[in-house]
Image (spheres, rainbow, N blue to C red):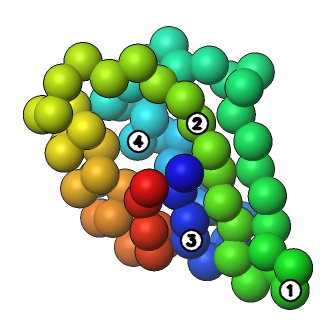
Amino acid sequence: MVLGRRAEIFEARVLAVFNRHAPGYDREGMTIRDSRKGTFASITIVITATGPEQLKALHEDLLATGLVQMVL
C-alpha cells in the first residue's frame, strides 16, 4: 500500500514508478481509496517481487516523488 497526500498527479506518479519497477502488476486488483476527509489517498497494488533489490528501488523511487508519505 502506498499512502500520500491527495493530489491530481498522485495516482499517475505512483503508477509510473510501478510500471518502471514491476511492469505487469495486476491493474484489475488495484484499489484506490481516499481518506475520510479527502486529505490522503492510498493505492494498493499487488506485485510478484523479484527480490529485495527490486523492493528497495521501488520504495526509494516512490518516496522520491515527494508525494508519498508511507509505503507498506
Q: Which mark is residue 37?
A: 1
Q: Residue at x 62, y 44 (%)?
A: 44
Q: Amino acid at mark 3?
A: Gly
Disc 2 to disc 3, C-alpha distance: 14 Å
Q: Is residue 13 visible?
A: no
From this view, report whether residue 2 is shown above or below residue 6: above
Secondary element under disc 4, as helix, strand or loop, is: helix
Q: Is disc 1 in contact with disc 3, using a CB cutoff of under 8 Å?
A: no
Q: How many marks?
A: 4
Q: Is residue 28 left or right of residue 23?
A: right
Secondary element under disc 2, as helix, strand or loop, is: loop
Q: Amino acid at mark 4?
A: Val
Q: Quadrant of the C terminus?
A: bottom left
The picture quadrant where one finds residue 33 is bottom right
Q: Between disc 2 and disc 4, whose residue precedes?
A: 4
Mark in front: 4 vs 1 = 1
Q: Between disc 1 and disc 3, whose residue precedes?
A: 3
Disc 4 to disc 1, C-alpha distance: 26 Å
Disc 4 to disc 3, C-alpha distance: 14 Å
Q: Amino acid at mark 2?
A: Ile
Mark in front: 2 vs 4 = 2
Q: Which mark is residue 15?
A: none
Q: Residues within 10 Å of mark 2 (few under 14, many from 20)?
A: some
Q: Is disc 2 in contact with disc 3, using a CB cutoff of under 8 Å?
A: no
> Which residue bears the numbered disc 3?
4
Q: Between disc 2 and disc 3, whose residue precedes?
A: 3
> Which residue bears the numbered disc 2?
45
Q: Is residue 69 visible?
A: yes
> Which residue bears the numbered disc 4?
17
Viewer-side residue, 34 vs 9? 34
Q: Residues within 10 Å of mark 4 (few under 14, many from 20)?
A: some
Could you tell me residue 12's position as x and y percent? 60, 48
